[in-house]
Image (cartoon, rainbow, N blue to C red):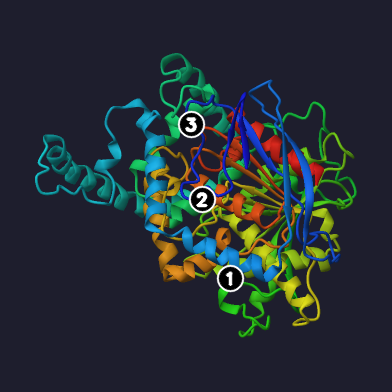
Amino acid sequence: MIMTEGIHSIIIPQHCTDSLGPPPSSSPSCSSIFSSMSTTGRNADHGTIEDHKINQTTSTCKEHSSMSTTNSTCTISSSNSVSVVETEKKNDDDVRGYFETEVAMKMNERAKKENSGLNLNLGIPIDLTVFTSHHPINIQDGDCSISKIAQKIIRLPIQTILHLFDRLFSLVEHPLFKFWSFFIPLRFRQKLTFLGWGLYFPIHKFFIGRRSGVHKNVSMEYHALTSVMWWGRLFPITIQRMRFSLSQLHVCHPPTAYPKWDDAPSKSKCTDIMNNGDYHGVRGHVHEIYHEMTNRITSTGTKTFNDSMVPKLKLTRSEMTVTGLYLQHSSRPSEKVIFWIYGGAFLAGDSRGNLGIAEKMGMLCGADRDGEMRDIFIPDYRLVPEYHLDDAVHDVTLAYEYLIYERGILPENVTLLGISSGGGLVVLVLQALAKSRRAYEDGKIGSYVPMPAGGVLMCPFVDYTEPKGSMREYIKHDLIVNQAVYEEGIPYLEKVLGCHENRVRASPCYCDFYGLPPLCICVSQHEIVYDQTMLLAKRAEDHGVDVTVGVWKYMCHVFPMLCAFIPEGRASFKFMCDWIKDH
């Protein structure tokens, strides 16, 4: 693997799976792209079957950096010829090695070392989360330092006050959330949000400047955003609060915010149909999807998937119903469609909250090419803990079949895009499609669903085993998945998935990547999913998948979703759009 950081080139060996750590922190803060192009063993196009062999190929990848004018070119060559059985056996051997104690320790130490060079806690010399965390402060024998004892004494009254505040707020939060969501117009909420940001940013720039972010090289906007969002880690988080927060994403993405449409179509042209976009806060027309499927082709999940490819459980009528939102830009449906899968750690998220940001992706992907903006399909899926992870995989896979067979969209014109846990769902769906295709070739089933053009993974959450490395240590500075979110969300992995073996089977980064279409991955080097994302990229490349990875430094989880506020988010958003245009 080759990753380029500005004018510094760092080579990461293929066999380096013990730490999967980032390059030295002395590299400049800039956006970069790591691109790995290798020929797939099974052609990922639609319906074409080829012999499994990887011919010697030479690919060229060019770095694009929004914060550096230096361009560099790298060439990767590979020569392999290996059977499917040998490949899967090698993968099983590799997976076992990832869970050795020594590997986890190295990953943890690497992440701790990286943290030591960052500006944590807004530059405040004391970590305030030690007083608010649910985990008690352990004072071991012989460790009776004044600081430890003081933390122990101060922690109890602070936690008591926060607990009382939490109980009082829980009494009124439901009517408050309902009033904000249903009685205050969306346009007013959007204007209020950006009015507050417009007033706060110059104040921060004048009084605080570049002292609050994790690194001085991040943009001034990111420093200001850090000063606002950091405090959320001190207050209790519940699933209800997570779901409300993610349902309000569209408040941060009004049509007047990024992107500016100077060189693109200025507005959607839904002239032949009633345009309800203004009600939903978007330019295009929104179709509410409710469709009962008569059958499904692809079996999914660890509960219903077996060697004979025949589902053991009979699906109910509700389980065979596809729901979601289909955003149409013009009077006619577009030829190409983005299949948008929202995130939320499988605990939260909804289609309506993602409409604004998803529409912008579809509009940008149509600019400067054929001019046709891409429609967006955002399916709903069932959430944890009310349902199982397998239910989410089933819902999304069924929605993909609906898009292909009911709406008539050609598979090669569909691009899957997933955010965080939605990125994990993208990979799980692609892996289910690939497994179904292999079963068809072996004569076990009579048909299979063709692959889409590719998958875009935005900061993908793909490892559901015991947290380690960046997942464990970077919560100390991540603005999205902080200590409070971590303590609320992580325990559900074990509750829902069960034992370690089940969590490994459910984690897409440890599954088989053979036969997957091209993947584009966008991630921050200093966010919680960095280690597992790089592991996924390496394993996909080892399986012959065409992988392109864009890496930004010092950003939080899902930072592209903050594109309306920070330039790093806009650069990463454009990076993903450019990849979609080329695929």
Q: CA distance from mark 1 to mark 3?
A: 41 Å
Count of picture labels: 3
Residue ranking furthest to the top: 206
Occupied quadrant, residue 366: top right
Q: Is residue 16 left or right of residue 376?
A: left
Camera-nearest residue between 240 and 312: 312
Q: Which mark is residue 24?
A: 3
Earlier residue among tags 1 and 2: 2
Q: Residue at x 73, y 29 (%)?
A: 260
Mark found first going from the N terminus, 3 or 2: 2
Using the image as rendered, state which of residue 246 and residue 500 is in the foreground.
Answer: 500
Label 3 crowd bin: few (<14), some (14–19), many (20+), radius 10 Å: few
Name the spot of residue 253 as percent of width and height, x first. Answer: 63, 38
Q: Secondary structure at mark 1?
A: helix
Considering depth in this image, is 196 or 465 the residue closer to the camera?
A: 465
- Report the mark closest to the observer, 1 or 2: 2
The residue that mark 2 highlights is: 17
Q: Amino acid at mark 1?
A: Asp
**Residue 122: x, y in percent?**
37, 28
Q: Nearer the viewer, mark 1 or mark 3?
A: 3
Mark 1 in CB contact with mark 3 (< 8 angstroms)? no
Report, in whole angstroms, how far the alpha carbon at label 1 lies from the one at label 2: 31 Å
Label 2 element class: loop
At a point 35% along the width and 26% down the height, the residue shown is 123
Tell me the crowding category of disc 2: few under 14, some 14 to 19, or many 20 or more residues within 10 angstroms, Cα based.
some
Q: Where residue 313 appears, x then y in whole percent?
A: 61, 84
Query: Is label 1 in contact with label 2 (beta carbons under 8 Å)?
Result: no
